[in-house]
Amino acid sequence: MSNRNISTRSVQIGVGRDEQTGGISFPIYPSATYRHPGVGQSTGYDYTRSGNPTRDVLEQGIADLEGGNRGLVFASGMAALTTLFLHFSAGDHLVLSEDLYGGTYRVLADVFGKFGLSATYVDTTDTAAVEAAITDTTRGLLVETPGNPLLGVSDLEQLGEICRRHEMLFIVDNTFLTPALQMPISFGADVVVHSATKYLGGHSDLCAGVLVAKDAELGERLYMLQNATGAILPPQECWLLIRSLKTLPLRVQRHCETALTVARWLERHPKVEKVFYPGLENHPGHELSQKQAENFGGMLSFRTATADLAARALERLQLISFAESLGGAESLMTLPAVQTHADIPEKERERLGITDTLLRLSVGLEEADDIIADLEQALAD
Ligand SMILES: *Cc1c(COP(=O)(O)O)cnc(C)c1O
């Protein structure tokens, strides 16, 4: 990681790397295979699953942004997580945030469960609860902070210390804040995960995933798993993601500003019972966020007075789209209980507070006044 500002490093990804033409935009290399100069010789590229020049530029770029040693990019966030979980063995146990992306829960329960990898979900904003869940076979902790969809904030430094003490892999899903706001490796994370479909891609037009390993040895092991199982990101998508990363810090800053404005407006709305946004002073993770992140991000959730009102508001939206996903230029709203978190058993959802009155809003890059006007008409009588 150079000591240049992250905005500069984002913009400069790939610049100066196209030695043949000097192209500012690094080219897409679609070739599946490469000519060898001679027997036992290689240009550095043999076969595209094992290595591709466009992917290399992206992987090095994202590793640099996260302050890690090795970056790897995958066909989706779930492909990245799946490859990471393959690092573990039958009999191993993981501890994870209970306020977690539903797909991560599903792949562990329905896929890895039958291979003998077990998981316990705890409130990772409570470090004592994390300690208590650790057993002799616990090999890793996976944290999402802020959580999804309730935006709970977990203490990265303390959790990193617990993982070091118990010799567990510390994994942070940094999808919500991105390295523009939060750098988990600087707090002791061994691996950072992203659904690059979200803020890194940033335009709702690309599906991709990222792993960044803090050290070379783990990076090599994850590369082996990526090459062995093959869920790589194709070169055209790599190029699109390089293009997106150039504006990441700029976009994220605007997402944060608008989200705070919208959160403050929602907080005063008579039909909104509660707003979950770490940027609000009354959020329990407000101070911790200020300690470990540059800003509070573009995601917020809120609880309406009744389930009918939540459903009606979604149907009335005109500017904001009623759609899953997040992190794009376009504002998106979902009902996590029936969409992103539907795979979590109902009883568990109720306990967590993921009810049918909870709406999640990914605040886009539209003008704050226009987003607020849409919410106002959607929540009206
Ligand atoms: C979307 C998401 C994922 C899964 O990523 P895909 O790109 O949809 O496969 C993982 N973690 C978080 C926090 C997400 O929001």
Image (spheres, rainbow, N blue to C red):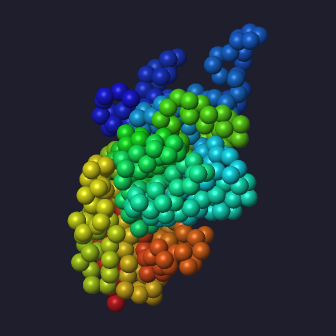
Which residue is situated farthest in the top direction here?
Answer: 38
Q: Residue at x 42, y 33 (%)?
A: 64
User: What x and y, as percent, mark residue 53?
Assistant: 58, 27
Q: Describe residue 112's horizontal placement relative to residue 62 as left or right.
A: right
- Across and down, in percent, residue 242 comes to 48, 38
Name the side, left or right, on which 200 lies relative to 79.
left
Nearer to the camera, 370 or 53: 53
Q: Is residue 335 visible?
A: no
Residue at coordinates 54% horizontally, 67% vertically from top-left?
Answer: 340
Residue at position x 41%, y 68% in the image: 150
Residue drawn 33% across and 37% down? 6
- Residue 17 position in % (x across, y down): 47, 22
Choose top left, top right, bottom left or bottom right for residue 375: bottom left
Residue toward you, 362 or 173: 173
Residue farthest to the bottom, as pictured: 381
Q: Quadrant of the C terminus?
A: bottom left
- Which quarter of the figure has residue 312? bottom left
- Please say if 129 is above or below 10: below
Image quarter hosting the N terminus: top left
Q: Position of residue 299 (x, y in %)?
A: 38, 62
Question: Left of 342 or right of it: where is 99?
Answer: left
Quarter holding residue 11: top left
Report whether residue 86 is seen. yes
